[in-house]
Amino acid sequence: MPRRENCPKWDLTPEEAVRWQESLRQHLVLEDDLPPSVRLVGGVDSGYTDTQAIAVITVFVYPELELIHHAIGQVPVHFPYIPGLLAIREGPAIEAAWGNIPPERRPDLLFFDGQGIAHPRGMGIASHMGVLLDRPSIGVAKRILVGHHEPVPDEQGAWRPLVYRGKVVGAAVRTKVGVKPVYVSPGHRISLPTAIEYTLATVRGYKLPEPTRLADKLARQWRRKLASGVRK
DNA sequence: GCGACAG
DNA sequence: ATCTTGTCGC
């Protein structure tokens, strides 16, 4: 596990990472603070090879949902997967991808594959990166990290509160009939009702919102290129 | 001490 | 996340 000596920002021990999250939490905004009319929405997803972390950020025009751009970030893996510290593992590659998007094409709203505030310290990857990139963000996870919920009716758009320590931190949302719900939670600069609205507004026949679904697909493609002998 | 545990 | 073919079901 190479130490990132030239980048103290991400070169942390798990204990230091926890303290960083606790301090970043002070900057979290859980009220709607989005542009009057959101025109660009993005999706973030990561993939890995033995040594490399790859992040892809897609950019879609909203509400038409047409893919107009995507950027890739690739850096050496520097941190293991530890539940609750996902942002430390994926952050560097995501920042690299973000830096590769022309400023004028940077999304007004970002969807992440993982939790927002539905996290032990209220700082899942969507919240963490939302604060660092200073963008409204939403966490859409395929599985629960923390919290519980009542059964969700098997109807498109049905949802139930996700409760953790007596607080509503997100929602289990049925984005597709006959498929397990996804777990939506506010990342940064957005409320839960609005996060649910945008999630349902970007779903097109699949379980995941289009921005993250496409980012996942592109990350897989790029990983195969690396695995099949292309160095870069 | 025993489970739970995003990607 | 990743390793991987066929297979059940709509």
Image (cartoon, coloured by chain):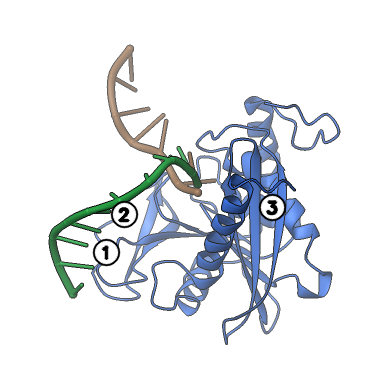
Chain colours: A blue, B brown, C green
In this view, the residue in front, A60 or A182, is: A60
The answer to which image quadrant residue A101 occupies is bottom right
Q: What amino acid type is highlighted by mark number 2? A: His
Q: Is residue A210 left or right of residue C5?
A: right
- What is the spatial separation of the Cα atoms under label 1 and label 2, in whole angstroms? 8 Å
**Chain identity of mark 1:** A
**Chain identity of mark 2:** A
- Do labels 1 and 2 touch, CB within 8 Å? yes
Q: Residues within 10 Å of mark 3 (few under 14, many from 20)?
A: many
Q: Quadrant of the N terminus of chain A?
A: top right
Q: Earlier in the sequence, mark 2 or mark 3?
A: 3
Q: Pick out the residue farthest to the bottom.
A: A64
In this view, the residue in front, A21 or A211, is: A211
Q: Position of residue A97 (x, y in %)?
A: 73, 57
Tag 2, which secondary structure?
loop
Q: Residue at x 72, y 53 (%)?
A: A73
Closer mark to the observer between disc 1 and disc 3: 3
Q: Are marks 2 and 3 on the same chain?
A: yes
Q: Which mark is residue A149?
A: 2
Asked if one can make out residue A132 in the rendered structure from this viewpoint, the answer is no
Q: Tell me the residue that label 3 is attached to.
A: A94
Q: Tell me the residue that label 1 is attached to.
A: A152
Tag 3, which secondary structure?
helix
Q: What amino acid type is highlighted by mark number 3? A: Ile
In this view, the residue in front, A153 or A99, is: A99
Q: Residue at x 49, y 71 (%)?
A: A199
> Is A72 above or below relative to A194?
above
Q: Residues within 10 Å of mark 2 (few under 14, many from 20)?
A: some
> Is A228 above or below relative to A76?
below
Q: What amino acid type is highlighted by mark number 1? A: Val
Q: Residue at x 24, y 59 (%)?
A: A151
